Image (cartoon, grey):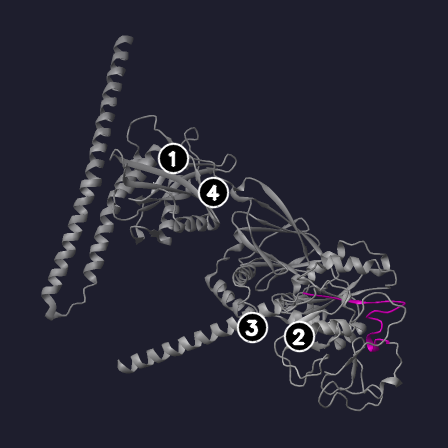
Amino acid sequence: MTIFLILYETAKNCGLVFGVAVLTFYLIKILCTLLAESGSVHATTAQLKGHHWTLVDAFDAGYYCNVCNDSIYHGLECDYCGIVTDVSCMKKAEQSISCKSVAGVNKLEHLWVPGNLPLSSVCCVCFQNCGVGFGLNNLRCSWCQRTAHDACRHRISPNCDLSTIHNLSDNLHSWSPVVVFANRFSGSGEGYLVLKAFRRVLNPIQVCDLSRQSPKLGLELLNKIKDISKMVVLVAGGDGTVGWVFSAIEEISWPENRRPTVAVLPLGTGNDLSRVLGWGDGHSGIVDAAGILQQLSQATPVKLDRWLVSVTSPTKLGMKWSKSEYKMNNYLSVGVDALVTLNFHNRRHSLPRVLSGRFMNKFLFFTYGTKDVLERMCRNLHLHVELQLDDKPVELPELEGVVVLNIPCWGAGVKPWQMGKGGPPQLIDDGLLEVGLSEPYRIGQAKKVQIRIKDCSLPMQVDGEPWRQESRMAKVNCVYLSSEAYLVCLIHAYANEREEVMGLLIGYTDEQTGCCHVTNTVQLKRLVKRSDRVEMTPETLSEAITYADNLNAVNDSLDESVRKKPVRVIGWYHSHPHITVYPSGVDNHTQCEYQNALDPMWIGIIFSVYNTDERSGIGRLNYLAFQSFENGHYSVPVMIVPKLEPAIDSILSERIGALTELCFAEESDAFEKAVQSFNFDDNLQQLKTLAYSHNVSTYTTNVCSAIRGFVHPLLAYLTDRSRHSNYNLVVDALSKSSNDDSSV
């Protein structure tokens, strides 16, 4: 025991230290992110004149201020031209040192910046190492990024040809620019590094920060320049950012030969479109802007299908229908993978600064993926969706997810359509969509795909943007509760003052009018018996379904003139002893699960019993029928349907008898479980006898309480009904005899 306690305390302390370390790491990360956000101390991304300063907390060794020539550890750096300065020298730098000009000029000249050259720099004239030594040694052009010795500068033409990117950056004649779009917060700060790297080698007007301006603004500005022959748009980000830029391009009227092509620099996780186009699964570390531009100049354009997804859904409570449209580049899915994405999306947006980064994103995906797959919340999906390919219905096997593919990759690199043998090829520009399951099962290819959610809400996603889609759910407008069923529910609710009781409702529904007709009930044993909670076993529902089938069998044997509508299990009821009638959060959750898994018109009824009016002290009974939605519930009017004839119904007698037997059976089971739980040794025989006597007394008390509060009033009621029925029989017999005598 001592060893265990020591190990436990050690593990406890280690866990505490680890927790503190992780918390400290993320606090530092948050502070760094905030510092990066506030780092632009002088200008914004949209600024077209002057330096664009960014606060740098710690320079590498060997950096010198371009104003005072002193060694610098922290200060400011211009993202456009690359000069660095102390905070105190910033104003002097703005006045004395020129930055890149974005305005049009007749000739583009080199913009030489002294010192702070990259490591291993080579002079473009003598091809010897340069930038070595202390202070601001040698020069670097902010446009073409060439480096040169001070003595070699006179041998270089003053006009800058932009080196290897002459046709991709600012040019005086035929201009084929690259426009870079990136969000500085994407990829856990990698977006900022992308913006910084491309501002060094391109005209600043060609680099747009999506956190501060929309892509449409930058594209419209470049579309007005007449000298552009064609344009390449480089999107640094995930699939969602790429789709945003695609939509912006489509909103602009382009000349026929100037519609831009799009390349992808992947950041973050996923990046399925980038994988298909050959740009890889992600980017991290140093951004080689010149190398990426060189790859762009050698890339081959391909066509990509884009699809319009129209989603028609009800508003809350099913009162109205709304229509939403999405543009799809990659895939659409319904089911378990969309559920994983939805849970990940909700968790990440709850703590956006902490839950960022590729590792944390992958960890969250793994966590929710494992949880949702094991819990199987989307099982039996084929029972809740209908699929049509080119207006032809498709029969679905048992499944948990349906995926509609436009590209081969799905789920961060998986290629489900290519798994297995056979099947037509998959192309990204063939005008066809591939439809399959998550495991994978090929269903077919089509130009038009229709997915209808029948009777529940399901998670969906389009290109990684998830939401929960509601179905065409029928709304319950009214509940007609027969007086016999009402009486049984009431007797059952009053049978136990300390614990909630529960039963199932038998009847039929009318989807046209939204009415539920409750004609019978089923009372079975409870799985959980508490004062604030009650649950039933799956066998309970199975037995109730069997009971309804037996009623239908009897109904089918009757004459057609008296045959009733077929019945089934349509809802549940439970009691709230000593508390309000309104459903709790657990009640709403349970009702939602029933509506989603069993029937959208599934109804719940709550009976609030053993309450007294505070003013009069008179006992008070409340009951409420309800249905639930994601964030609450709404009440449904209840109409008690009286019985025309006062005679005791056979079904009512059967349910009352079953209810009486159930109450005593539950008490007997509780007593037997308590007795079987005795684990006393033989030398504790007296304690065992005392515990047994206590349980016998408790059992006897509960049985007597049930007889006093439940059986005795019920017996009196049945006796009264029996006398009333016998009186009616005597009256009918005398009336018949009188009629016979008068006829004679």
Quick check: 509 left or right of 291?
A: left
Label 3 or label 1, whichever comes before in sequence order: 3
Label 3 and label 1: CA atoms lie apart by 56 Å
Label 4 or label 1, whichever comes before in sequence order: 1
Name the foreground residue: 77 vs 190.
Answer: 77
Give the structural element (helix, strand or loop) at label 2: helix
Specify the amino acid type for callout 2.
Ser
Q: Would you place residue 303 above or below residue 619 in this image? A: below
* Magenta residues, start to end: 160-182
Image quadrant where one finds the N terminus: bottom left
Residue 189 location (% of width, % of height) = 62, 70
> Which residue matches tag 1?
481
Specify the amino acid type for callout 3.
Phe
Label 4 and label 2: CA atoms lie apart by 71 Å
Whether residues under marks 4 and 2 lie with C-beta atoms below 8 angstroms apart, the answer is: no
Specify the amino acid type for callout 4.
Met
Q: Residues within 10 Å of mark 2 (few under 14, many from 20)?
A: few
